Image (cartoon, rainbow, N blue to C red):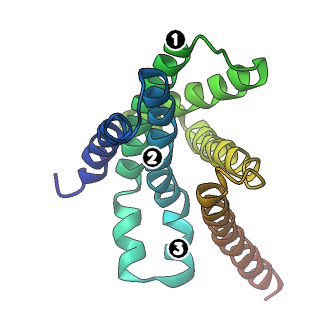
Amino acid sequence: MEKTWPVWIGGMLGLAAIAFAFATQAGVVNQWHEAAHYTARVGFPLLIHAYVARPLVELTRSELAKYILARRKYFGLGFAVAHTIHLAALITAIEVSGEGKGIVTYVFGGAAYAILYVMAFTSNTAAMKAMGAWWKRVHRVGIHYLWFIFFQSYAGRMADPEQAMVAIPFTIIALAAAAVRFTAWWKSRQRKRAQADS
């Protein structure tokens, strides 16, 4: 439990987001519509923790960064739990409203869930050994893709006055996380160059 708490947090936040939507919204359609929004939002911080865990350690060597890195897998699994609840809320919202999504949303959103579940089900030592070098490739591409899905979703809503209050800070957080990863990658590259030249 000491290390796995992000998984439980993911489940509790996802369910709390649905409860909050039902407590604050009127009408079943609107309740499920907002539940889909809220469940996506509560999972986002868990993804960001997993996204920046190792780069933060490389950049800061702080105890907090090491604490996050030690639980990176569980932050990822917590996000998977929260986002599964989001998927259920989203499907229900589509069903009760009768309003479908565009083909682009289904294709790219479906790919995100496929990647998410591949990563979740291979987050163990046995899968890591069986997949070899492919394990790191799959997880690296996967987490970048999941980051991108959130980034483009929130960045695309910044101009909407009704959604800007959430879209702008979440976009900034996504960009800051990407900056952390890029900075860590750049510094690692510079160290390798210096070692090769010495």
Q: Which residue is mark 3?
A: 56
- Identify residue type, mark 2: Gly
Q: In the picture shown, does residue 178 fall above or below 131?
A: below
Residue 94 in the image: state x and y as whole percent: 55, 17
- Identify residue type, mark 1: Glu
Alpha-carbon distance for marks 3 and 2?
Answer: 20 Å
Alpha-carbon distance for marks 1 and 2?
Answer: 22 Å
Could you tell whether 84 is left or right of 22 in the image? right
Q: In the picture shown, does residue 187 fall above or below 110?
A: below
Of pointers 3 and 1, the one earlier in the residue sequence: 3
Q: Are marks 1 and 2 in contact (CB under 8 Å)?
A: no
**Residue at x-position 60% and y-position 46%:** 143
Q: Nearer the viewer, residue 106 or 130?
A: 106
Could you tell whether 65 is left or right of 163 in the image? left
Q: Which residue is mark 1?
A: 95
Label for residue 43? 2
User: In the picture, residue 98 is in which quadrant?
Assistant: top right
Label for residue 82? none
Q: Nearer the viewer, residue 147 or 126?
A: 147
Could you tell whether 97 is left or right of 7 in the image? right
Of pointers 3 and 2, the one earlier in the residue sequence: 2
Residue 42 in the image: state x and y as whole percent: 43, 49
State the residue lying farthest toward the bottom: 198
Q: Is residue 16 visible?
A: yes
User: In the picture, residue 23 is in which quadrant?
Assistant: top left
Q: Nearer the viewer, residue 109 or 92?
A: 92
Q: Are marks 3 and 1 in contact (CB under 8 Å)?
A: no
Category of crowding for the residue at label 2, using alpha-carbon neighbours closer than 10 angstroms: few (below 14), some (14–19), many (at least 20):
many
In front: mark 3 or mark 2? 2
User: In the picture, residue 111 is in which quadrant?
Assistant: top right
- Identify residue type, mark 3: Leu
**Residue at x-position 42% and y-position 25%:** 27
